Structure formats: structure tokens, C-alpha cells
Amino acid sequence: MVFANIEYLLLLLLLIPYIIWYIMKHRSIGATLQVSDSMPYVAAPQSYKNYLLHAPFVLRVITITLLIMVLARPQTTDSWQNSEIEGIDIMLAIDVSTSMLAEDLKPNRLEAAKSVAAEFINGRPNDNIGITLFAGESFTQCPLTVDHAVLLNLIKDAKCGLIEDGTAVGMGIANAVTRLKDSKAKSKVIIMLTDGTNNKGDISPLTAAEIAKSFGVRVYTIGIGTNGLAPYPYPVGGTVQYVNLPVEIDEKTLTQIAGITEGNYYRAKDNTELKEIYSEIDKLEKTKLNVKEYSKRQEEYMKFALAAFCCLLMEILLRNSILKKIP
């Protein structure tokens, strides 16, 4: 714990003369009732009030001490911190077209992809990771960050229908490249996951791959979906009917993208294979990154203020009840 106004703690020195004054005053006070001989009272039992005689003074000193600490503004010790860590820069490009609702992976392709991606993020705490979502167009869900708590919350919000439907593979890669092109990391990687064929966007997948290559970005492509037909939930009236739709993944193009950028192409037909693919990509080489971390300071004065109030209240109650002086 630190104090924002630490100079106020010097006021604690004023307690020293106050305590000395109290001791001297207490010694100089004469007896209220004088008797010729006090020996008959030696064996008399002492009242519990004798033990509480100095309690109000002690409580007052504690109250003043706590109030001074409140003025000094105690805070938690969070601050900016520069650190050097091992990691790489990774953009996760995830297809959110409506075909990702197919349930050949459980509970569906998109949720399976989000779950495995979350595990991948948790397993690489030192990496700069960001998220690009694409369908008929693309956008950055989260830029590169080492704040993985924020990243995980944003990946949970990824869903179909956020943008125009379709599959713009080239746009997804291009968007991710814009987030990586200025990176100083030696290893810059895009992990792109899709279940379809490029049918939208102003940039072709191979052109986007060439752009990625020019910036030293490697692209790992993942085709997600079973072979043959996949059950797809189709809303009919107030119910959901399942229809079997053919799985059409442009594996040739995805393989070419990976080849141009010196990455790899993978095919995930079920949840287990998808996890294994991310585990293999997890073995990527690492490079050093300089990270500047910040944690917001928290004011902690309230607990001291409440304690001071309680001590003051106890002093007032003692002075006006069992320790009340009668003239």
C-alpha cells in the first residue's frame, strides 16, 4: 500500500506532545474526595471502570491516527510497469457467416471454434493476440493485446449475424494483416478459420496472401466441417427444422494461402481434430516482446474512515455512560 499524500503522515508527530501532555495532566490531578487514611480501602475490590479509565484517550489517539491516514490517501500499489516477455503476435481470424451454425461440430462450428480458441489464448499468456471476425465483410473485434481477460470476453461475444453474410476470406486476411504489419515481433502469425468458399469481398484470398507475405506474416488456415453433409438449423415459423447441407470448403485455395506465406493448412472434421490443430500451432517459436502493463490504482481510505468513525463513537459512548464524570 502507498500514500498519495504521504507528507500528511508527518502530522502523526503531533501525537507525541499530546500523549506527554495527557500523562503529565493525569499525574497532577488531585483526588476529588480526600480522606485522612486510605488503608481501609486497600483490600476493597477494584471496579472494572478502573481498567477503562484511559480507554477514551486511547480511542481518541487511534481516531486521530486514522484520520491522518485518510488525509494521506492510502492506495493500492498498482502502477505502470515495463517488462520483457517471450511471445509472438497472433491474429485469430474467425469466420462468423451463418454456415458456422452447422452442427457437425458440437454444439456448432462457431461455438466449438470459440471454445478451442479460448483454450489456445489461455495457453499463451505472454503473446500479443487479437481477433478479426469476417463473413461478407470483416472487422477487428479486438486489436493485439496481452490483456487476455478482455480478449476472452470479446471472443464470447462473437456470433453470426453481426455483419453482412457471406465468406470474404481475402478481406479477413487483409484486416488481420493491417493489425500485424507494424508489429516489431519476429514472428507474426494469422490463424484463419473458415468453413466455406470465398464469395464476397474486394480482395481475393491469394492477393491477401501475397500482402501477408510482403509483411512477413505467416498464415495458418483451418477448414472446419465434416465430409459430405452437415446438419444445419433452419427456422420455420416458430420452430427449428434441420436440413442437411453439403460441406463446401475451398481446400485448394486455403492450401495455397498457407503455402504462399509459409504456413500450414489443416482440416478439422470434429472437435477433437480442431483441438489437436490448435495444439500443433501452439508449438510456434517465440520472440521477445516489450510490454507496458498498467493497473488502475484503487483508493483505500474508506476502511480507515470507517474505523475512525467507530473509534470516535465508542469514545463518546464511554465518556457519556459508564465513565461519565460527576462534578
Image: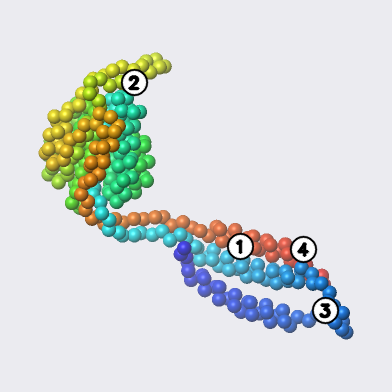
Return the residue at label 4: 321
Q: Name which quarter of the figure residue 57 lies in.
A: bottom right
What number is the disc on residue 143?
none
Where disc 2 sits, the SS reads strand
What number is the disc on residue 42?
3
Task: Identify the residue at image location x=58%, y=68%.
Answer: 65
Mark-to-mark CA distance, 2 and 4:
76 Å
Return the residue at label 2: 233
Residue 310 sits above or below residue 214 on the image: below
Task: Identify the residue at image location x=66%, y=63%.
Answer: 312
Q: Position of residue 288 (x, y in %)?
A: 23, 55
Q: Name which quarter of the figure residue 170 lies in.
A: top left
Mark-to-mark CA distance, 3 and 2:
95 Å
Report the side of 184 relative to 236 (left or right).
Answer: left
Return the residue at label 1: 308
Mark-to-mark CA distance, 4 and 3:
27 Å
Q: Position of residue 9 (x, y in %)?
A: 52, 71
What crowding class fits label 4: few (fewer than 14 Cα within 10 Å), some (14-19), or many (20 or more)?
few
What crowding class fits label 3: few (fewer than 14 Cα within 10 Å), some (14-19), or many (20 or more)?
few
Query: Does residue 158 show up?
Result: yes
Where disc 1 sits, the SS reads helix
Q: Earlier in the sequence, mark 3 or mark 2?
A: 3
Q: Earlier in the sequence, mark 4 or mark 3?
A: 3
* CB-based contact (under 8 Å), mark 4 and mark 3: no
Where disc 3 sits, the SS reads loop
